[in-house]
Image (cartoon, helix red, strand yellow):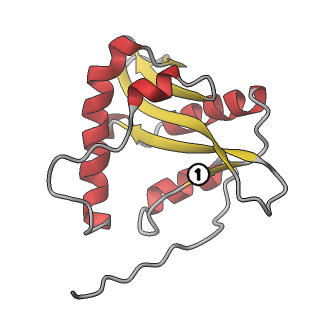
Amino acid sequence: MNNEITIREAVKSDIPVLLQHEQEVVKAERPMDPTIRDSGVKYYDLDALMENPRATVMVACDGDKIVATGYALEKPARTYLDHKTFAYLGFMYTDPAYRGKGINGKIVSALQDWCTKAGLIEIRLHVYDENDPAIKAYEKKGFKKHMIEMRLRTEL
C-alpha cells in the first residue's frame, strides 16, 4: 500500500472498477438483507450520478488503484422539515485490504466538503443495524442514529 491515499471525483473511465465495487457492496449487504435478489442486482446509476450537477461520486486511490468509493446526492426533504433538500450519501465501500485505515473517513470528509459548497446543511445515509463497523465509522464522523426502519415479510 502506498502511504498516500488521494481522494478525487470519479470519472467515466472509472466505471468498470466502480461496477465491480458495486457488486462487492451487494455481496456484503446480502447476508444482512434476505430480500436482496440472488442475481442481477444493480444499486446505482453511476452515469447519471456523474452527470448530475447536484451529485458527486468520490473515489480514494492508492496510486492508480481505486480502493474506496462514496457518493453524495441532493434529494428533496419532507415538506415539514426545516430544510428543503438534503444530501444522501451512498455507495460507501472500502476494499477489505484497506479497511481500518481511516479511508472511509476521508471519503466522508470529501463528501461533506462538497455538501457544504453545494449549500446542503443536512446529510443522511442508511446503514444496516447489524453493520457495527460502519456505524462506528459514521459516528466518528459525527453522524447520529436517527430512525429505525422496521420490516415484516408476510406470507401470500
The residue that appears at 81% across and 50% down in the rendered structure is: 83
- Counting from the top left corner in percent of width and height, residue 59 is at 46, 24
Nearer to me, 60 or 16: 16
- For the view shown, which residue lies furthest in the bottom direction? 155
- Counting from the top left corner in percent of width and height, residue 16 is at 26, 21
- Total numbered badges shown on the rendered structure: 1
- Counting from the top left corner in percent of width and height, residue 28 is at 29, 52
- Callout 1, which amino acid? Tyr
Badge 1 crowding class, 10 Å Cα cut-off, few under 14, some 14 to 19, many 20 or more, is some
Nearer to me, 24 or 119: 119
Which of the 4 quarters of the picture holds residue 131? bottom left
Which of the 4 quarters of the picture holds residue 153? bottom left
User: Is residue 153 placed above or below 81 in the rendered structure?
Assistant: below
- Counting from the top left corner in percent of width and height, residue 93 is at 40, 40
Which of the 4 quarters of the picture holds residue 69? top left
The residue that appears at 38% across and 14% down in the rendered structure is: 12
Name the residue carrying label 1.
Answer: 138
Nearer to me, 102 or 79: 79
Nearer to me, 72 or 107: 72
- For the view shown, which residue lies furthest in the left direction? 39
Q: Where is the C terminus found, in terms of image quarters? A: bottom left
The residue that appears at 49% across and 43% down in the rendered structure is: 90
- For the view shown, which residue lies furthest in the right direction? 82
Q: Is residue 27 left or right of residue 59?
A: left
Q: Work out whether residue 39 can be spotted.
A: yes
The residue that appears at 43% across and 40% down in the rendered structure is: 91
Q: Where is the N terminus found, in terms of image quarters? A: top left
Q: Is residue 30 left or right of residue 47?
A: left
Q: Work out whether residue 58 can be spotted.
A: no
